[in-house]
Image: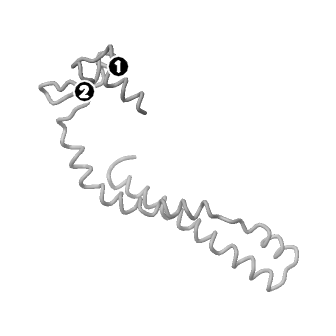
Amino acid sequence: MGSFISMLRGGPHDRPTGTGRPVRESDGTARFSKQFSDFILDLGDADSAKFEQEYFPEYAMILQRGPDLLRQLRAYVDSTQEIRTAITSPTAENEEAAWRKLGPSVMLLKDCYEHAQDIGKQRRCDGRQ
């Protein structure tokens, strides 16, 4: 990533300002280097800032659940043995053990599904596909 940013800024032999910083034009745009002269960053457009202020709190609230879900997924332990035992030796005790082991996995799957749905709904609400 640092190399990419350095290329945008311009290397030691390609510094339009002599400092490696972007050149700001009078119209509010910025050019990073001669090598990428077609790459223009429009610093004068406030619409994106308004959009971010409007939707960022909602996205942040939804995305807060992500790290916890990832932690739970990393700690996942399968229920294969308990399910096999309940199928091959069908007793009430084996069936209960299988459900006890399988229940948390089902709830985790449900939580992940709902989290994905929340993200999808938010994307549709803000007009992005």
Q: Which amino acid does label 2 sit on?
A: Arg
Please name whichever residue, 6 or 114, is drawn nearer the observer in this view of the structure: 6
Label 2, residues with CA under 10 Å away: few <14, some 14-19, many ≥20: some
* Residue 76 in picture, x, y percent from top left: 64, 64
Cα separation between marks 2 and 1: 11 Å
Q: Which amino acid does label 1 sit on?
A: Gly
Q: In this view, does 129 lie to the left or right of 25?
A: right
* Residue 70 in picture, x, y percent from top left: 54, 59
- Rendered view: 68 above or below 5: below
Q: Is residue 41 left or right of residue 90?
A: left
Q: Residue 33 carries which label?
A: none
The quadrant where residue 91 appears = bottom right
Q: In this view, does 117 lie to the left or right of 55?
A: right
Residue picked out by circle 2: 21
- Rendered view: 14 above or below 82: above
* Residue 115 in picture, x, y percent from top left: 48, 62
- Residue at point 34% right, 16% down? 35
Mark 2 or mark 1, which has the lower sequence index?
1
Please name whichever residue, 32 or 40, is drawn nearer the observer in this view of the structure: 32
Label 1, residues with CA under 10 Å away: few <14, some 14-19, many ≥20: some
- Rendered view: 75 above or below 13: below
The quadrant where residue 87 appears = bottom right
Helix or strand or loop: what does disc 1 sit on?
loop
- Residue at point 26% right, 30% down? 41
* Residue 56 in picture, x, y percent from top left: 30, 55
| The N terminus: image quadrant | top left
Residue picked out by circle 1: 11
